[in-house]
């Protein structure tokens, strides 16, 4: 008799209105270890460069995490060390690729990597790819936003900018940390995990998902909280398409729901 998988996971990758796909996303479940991971990378550097950067990040993550999780009884300390190690490997891979291309060549990518060990969720985040928790009807962002957006939004609270001015600010999407083969200014990698409750929904995305407001995402989750992960992902994707924004960025969406009590 086959065991029920510990997680219901769905992924969507959408090009949006861009000419190329610079996002990359991957997931794998390890039933014997009662573990899983999801990784999202949003590349930058223009056509080809951004695509390469995001794929290098995904490859570094897979190469590092798969090695540990394929062990019969992987030591937990090694698994947790694998998160920053994957970021270091990705950074080195991008540095090597840029060096091979010659002087002046630059590219980079964000990294949002999540490791699930039973109901515990560990993560590493570099950049502005968001991770949300939907719990008891409320949406909250768990990871830090390494862009200028939080500083600009703080000016709204201070009364020096209006909400409309903050949303349209030309520096809003400027990253304050990214993997690009150099020193990484900020890394969000908490030591302590949070624990998924049976009714929780975990949402990961690239910043293209944020063409939906937090209020819109929350409303969609309220309407679909009991649905399968693939249906929740589909509802978010349909809402993005319905907006028909001419500037819609590449979008990665991952939905995670626990399935075992």
Image (cartoon, rainbow, N blue to C red):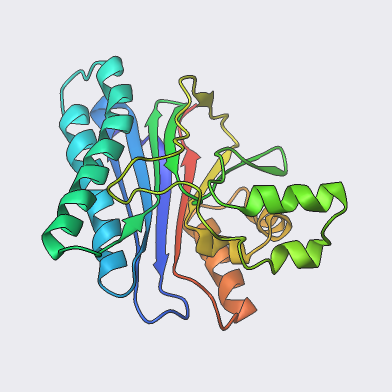
User: Number of callouts in the render?
Assistant: 0
Residue 139 percent location from the top left of the image = 68, 45
**Residue placed furthest toward the front:** 103
Q: Against 160, is 195 above or below?
A: above
Residue 2 coordinates in the image, percent (x, y): 26, 36
In x, y percent, where is residue 122? 43, 29
- Seen in the picture, residue 241 relative to 132 is either above or below; the reply is below
Q: Is residue 136 left or right of residue 70?
A: right
Q: Residue at x 63, y 49 (%)?
A: 225
| Front-most of residues 174 and 247 | 174
Q: Position of residue 203 (x, y in %)?
A: 53, 48
Residue found at the very far right of the displayed protein: 159
Query: Viewer-proximal residue, 41 or 156?
Result: 156
Residue shown at 44% from the left, 40% from the top: 125
Q: Quadrant of the image for the N terminus?
A: top left
Residue at image x 64%, y 53%?
A: 149
């Amino acid at each position: 008799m086959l065991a029920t998988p510990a997680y219901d996971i769905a992924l969507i990758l959408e090009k949006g209105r861009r000419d190329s796909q610079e996002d990359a996303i991957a997931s794998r479940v390890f039933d014997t270890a009662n573990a899983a991971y999801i990784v999202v990378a949003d590349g930058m550097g223009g056509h080809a460069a951004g695509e390469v950067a995001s794929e290098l990040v995904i490859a570094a993550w897979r190469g590092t995490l798969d090695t540990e999780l394929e062990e019969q009884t992987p030591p937990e300390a090694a698994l947790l060390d694998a998160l920053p190690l994957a970021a270091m490997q990705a950074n080195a891979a991008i540095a090597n690729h840029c060096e091979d291309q010659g002087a002046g060549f630059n590219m980079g990518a964000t990294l949002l990597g999540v490791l699930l060990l039973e109901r515990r969720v560990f993560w590493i985040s570099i950049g502005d790819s968001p991770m949300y928790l939907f719990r008891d009807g409320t949406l909250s962002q768990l990871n830090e936003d390494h862009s200028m957006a939080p500083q600009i939004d703080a000016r709204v609270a201070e009364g020096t900018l209006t909400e409309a001015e903050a949303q349209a600010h030309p520096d809003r999407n400027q990253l304050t940390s990214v993997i690009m083969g150099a020193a990484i200014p900020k890394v969000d990698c908490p030591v302590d995990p949070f624990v998924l409750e049976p009714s929780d929904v975990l949402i990961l995305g690239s910043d293209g998902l944020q063409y939906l407001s937090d209020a819109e995402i929350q409303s969609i989750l309220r309407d679909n909280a009991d649905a399968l992960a693939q249906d929740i992902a589909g509802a978010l994707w349909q809402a993005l398409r319905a907006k028909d924004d001419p500037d819609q960025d590449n979008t990665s969406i991952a939905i995670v729901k626990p399935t075992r009590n």
